[in-house]
Image (cartoon, grey):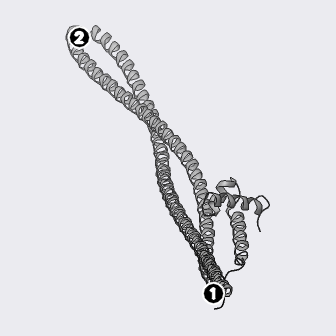
Amino acid sequence: MARTGITFDDVQRAIDTLLQRQEAPSVQKVRNILGTGSFTTISEHLREWRTRREERTDVPPPQGMPAELQALAEELWNQAQTAATDNLSHYREESDRQVAAAQERVADADRRAEDAEQRESALSAHLVTTEKRLQESIANSARMESTVQAQEQQLEKERQRSVQLEDQLARLQQENERLGQAHQVALGELQTEHAERLRQEEQRHETAEARLMGMLDDARQERQAAEKSHAQKLQQAEQRYETLQQQLQRVRADLLEEEKRHKETLLARSRAEDNARARQHENELLSERLEEQKRQLGTQAERIHALEAKLDEKIWSLAAQRREAARNENESDTATSTTAASTSTTPDN
């Protein structure tokens, strides 16, 4: 059903304008003149106008035309009208079918393009989120690597401190040996010189030895405590290192998964763009086919106008011949009447 927005009178006025311009009426031309209206509504009104025009084809011939001329004109007119009607009906039906199919395909292409745009928008948003998560994962990985490096540096410091303690213990042992050797030398000299000094030296030696043993015990205990603390810190650092390694592996796995999703997103977006370009190319082909159909309809309309012009010319020619024949017949009758009158007025001998 035609919508009430565009009436048949509106389409009739637009068609009259086109005929005044000597242009064949079409849906697109009518819509260009009206400036609005759907193709379906204009097409229905245009079909009704053509039907009414075909119904007005039975125009009576001019009065006084000879029967032979009237029969010839009617035959020519019927042949031209039949051919024009058949061609117009065929091209009109074919054009209507192609226009309807093209409109459906254009609407479907528009829907697909809209869906592709929505999918592309969703993919773009997902891509932005994925890139953001990827940047956050990279930042977390960098922070974890920095923490691991700090733990490794702390572990290296503990190892260096352990080495320093071992060096200090070795120096203390060397000092102890050196003091023992000096004590033995001093003890031998004192034994030969003074027994009293020997006793005093022995007492000092015992005192120094006790102090040295205490220092050795303290150093040994300090070393053991340091080694124990170092072992605990080393174990904790190793545990932290293993934990960080596990977290780093999980982060790398997440990064690989995000990269995979990112590639899939890019691939889907590329496919959507290819589909959109294909649909655009298809729309262009449909537009070209519609323009070709319009040109063919215009050519057919021009042919029909040419046939009508030839028919009018033929009718006027036959009418002129008839008038000429009538004039000659009248002149001949006049001449015959004049001759008869002259004969009747001549006196008898």
Left or right? Give the position of 164 relative to 79.
left
Give the residue at mark 1.
Answer: 68
Q: Residue at x 27, y 18 (%)?
A: 179
The residue tagged 2 is 190
Q: From this viewpoint, is residue 7 visible? A: no
Regarding residue 101, the answer to whether it shows in the image is yes
Q: Nearer the viewer, residue 7 or 317?
A: 317
Q: Amino acid at mark 2?
A: Leu
**199, 290: nearer the viewer:** 290
Q: Secondary structure at mark 1?
A: helix
Which part of the image, by quadrant, shows the N terminus?
bottom right
Name the spot of residue 116 as percent of width and height, x first. 57, 57
Q: Quadrant of residue 26?
A: bottom right
Observer-nearest of 301 and 60: 60
Q: Is residue 64 above or below residue 53?
A: below
Where on the picture, by quarter, is residue 58?
A: bottom right
Note whether 130 is above or below 103 in the view shown.
above
User: Which mark is on residue 16?
Assistant: none
Query: Marks 1/2: CA distance?
Result: 176 Å
As drawn, is 288 to the left or to the right of 78? left
Question: Outermost residue, front direction?
Answer: 349
- Left or right relative to 346: residue 150: left
